[in-house]
Image: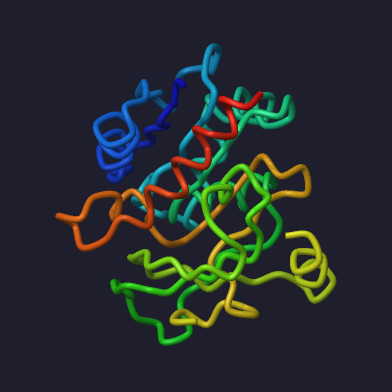
């Protein structure tokens, strides 16, 4: 399958994502500059981590106005697979493709550590290679990963769908249609044993498997 990896000024996990899906999983991957206006031919779009536009105003607030975002809206609306990681998650929330917002960590400190993620559902295109209840070890690296949403939205996410103070210990969410995922942990940083873990590869492999079935 063909992945597109968006690059905004200040993005810096793009090469890690490219390596994970191309060198580790053997898939095609192209970099997509933020001024591009077409995502034609892509099966999955990755919004990597980093500090897009220096995180001015709010993380993701300026990136959501980039020319490529119109194409991303159309891609997601048509059912295309989208995964936003860390700053990419923040961009998806700022753009309205996912509910909620990412606030400063409760401790007001940058957090860079391994975390345990509980797989709540194994029937999504991002978790099909996992088992419900399985615990994945995936690292985080962020200063604004404190997920917040109103109680009604949180209830909905738990029906359908914490080192930083996130409401209900949420590390990631998917949209109602099930094709857009945002997560603060970095799966691209744990796809090889050399890096200390391989659980992140399960997420990317799930995406590959879901596309191959369609």
Q: Left or right of 19: which side holds 121? A: right
Q: Residue at x 75, y 69 (%)?
A: 158
Percent x, y of residue 128: 58, 47
In the rendered image, the vertical position of residue 100 relative to residue 83, given as above or below = below
In the rendered image, the vertical position of residue 75 relative to residue 159, given as above or below = above
| Most foreground residue, 153 or 79 | 79
Classify residue 8 by image quadrant.
top left
Percent x, y of residue 134: 52, 68
Classify residue 143 by image quadrant.
bottom left
| Most foreground residue, 102 or 127 | 127
Percent x, y of residue 170: 59, 71
| Most foreground residue, 112 or 27 | 27
Classify residue 95 by image quadrant.
top right
Q: Residue at x 28, y 53 (%)?
A: 189
Q: Residue furthest bottom?
A: 107
Q: Residue at x 46, y 37 (%)?
A: 46
Picture mark count: 0
Q: Residue furthest left?
A: 194
Percent x, y of residue 77: 74, 30
In the rendered image, the vertical position of residue 97 relative to residue 196, given as above or below = above
Q: How is the image coloured?
A: rainbow
Quarter of the C terminus within the rendering: top right
Q: Left or right of 170: which side holds 8? A: left
| Most foreground residue, 20 or 128 | 128
Q: Left or right of 64: which side holds 74? A: right
In the rendered image, the vertical position of residue 205 relative to residue 55, given as above or below = above
Q: Residue at x 45, y 78 (%)?
A: 105
């Amino acid at each position: 399958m063909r992945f597109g990896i968006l690059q905004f000024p200040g993005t810096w996990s793009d090469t890690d994502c490219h390596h994970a899906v191309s060198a580790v999983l053997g898939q095609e991957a192209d970099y997509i500059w933020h001024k591009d206006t077409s995502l034609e031919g892509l099966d999955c779009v990755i919004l990597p981590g980093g500090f897009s536009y220096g995180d001015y105003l709010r993380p993701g607030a300026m990136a959501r106005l980039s020319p490529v975002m119109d194409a991303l809206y159309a891609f997601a609306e048509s059912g295309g697979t989208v995964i936003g990681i860390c700053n990419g998650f923040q961009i998806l929330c700022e753009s309205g493709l996912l509910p909620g917002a990412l606030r400063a960590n409760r401790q007001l400190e940058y957090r860079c550590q391994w975390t345990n993620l509980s797989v709540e559902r194994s029937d999504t295109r991002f978790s099909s290679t996992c088992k419900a209840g399985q615990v994945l070890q995936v690292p985080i690296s962020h200063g604004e990963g404190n997920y917040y949403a109103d109680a009604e939205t949180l209830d909905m996410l738990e029906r359908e769908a914490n080192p930083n103070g996130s409401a209900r210990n949420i590390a990631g969410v998917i949209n109602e249609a099930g094709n857009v995922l945002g997560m603060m942990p970095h799966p691209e940083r744990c796809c090889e044993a050399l890096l200390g873990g391989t659980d992140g590869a399960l997420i990317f492999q799930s995406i590959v498997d879901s596309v191959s079935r369609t």
